[in-house]
Image (cartoon, rainbow, N blue to C red):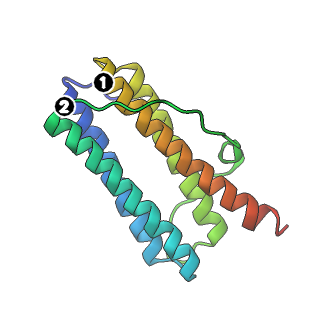
Amino acid sequence: MKKFASVDDILDFAIGLEQDAVDFYKKLATNSQTPDMKQVFEQFAREEIGHKARLTEVKEKGLYEMEPEVITDLQIADYLVSIKPSPEMSYRDALILAMKREKAAFKLYMDLSERAPNQEMKSLFLSLAIEESKHKLRFELEYDEFILREN
């Protein structure tokens, strides 16, 4: 994991990753082959914009706290192959890629929470990890509903 010199460095890193996620979901939405798929990815882009805004606000103002909650993990993403994004990717492949990205974001925020310099930052990163796990779960449920059940 990258070494950080300050809390601002950590927040800047996380803000950059959230912007990458926004760009990723917007590109998937643009390349979507169906209106439903486009809508799903646009919604996730908006949620990642919200994460970026929360991190930016914390950086500018200071503290943030949220009660932790447990999110179910179906672990579907653990068993799927990596997929590179492309304009002609199938809905199945887009869901797999999205699950993998959300899983990676979850792991990042969990790692950052373990290295947080204070309780407020730990709470922030745990909160973001929970959000990312919710995203992954939503993609897993979508995959279960529309991909696994079709086969």
Give residue 90's quadrant in the image.
bottom right
Which residue is disc 1 drawn over? 120
Residue 66 appears in the figure: yes
Q: CA distance from mark 2 to mark 1?
A: 9 Å
Q: Closer to the camera, 88 or 110?
A: 110
Give residue 119's quadrant in the image.
top left
**Left or right position of 147 against 4:** right
Crowding at dot 2, Cα within 10 Å, few <14 / some 14-19 / many 20+, comes out as few
Q: Residue at x 35, y 62 (%)?
A: 23
Give residue 2's quadrant in the image.
top left
Secondary structure category for the residue under label 1: helix
Residue 60 against residue 16 in the figure, above or below: above
Query: Residue furthest toward the front?
Result: 67
Residue 67, position as x, y percentages in the image: 45, 30
Which residue is disc 2 drawn over? 62
What's the mark number on residue 132?
Answer: none
Q: Are marks 2 and 1 in contact (CB under 8 Å)?
A: yes
Residue 126 against residue 104 in the figure, above or below: above
Q: Residue at x 66, y 66 (%)?
A: 92
**Left or right position of 98 against 6:** right
> Count the marks: how many?
2
Secondary structure category for the residue under label 2: loop
Residue 151, position as x, y percentages in the image: 85, 67
Residue 59 against residue 35 in the figure, above or below: above
Residue 55, position as x, y percentages in the image: 27, 42
Which three-letter amino acid code belongs to the residue tagged 2?
A: Gly
**Left or right position of 96 against 7:** right
Q: Closer to the camera, 15 or 3?
A: 15
Residue 33 appears in the figure: no
Which three-letter amino acid code belongs to the residue tagged 1?
A: Glu
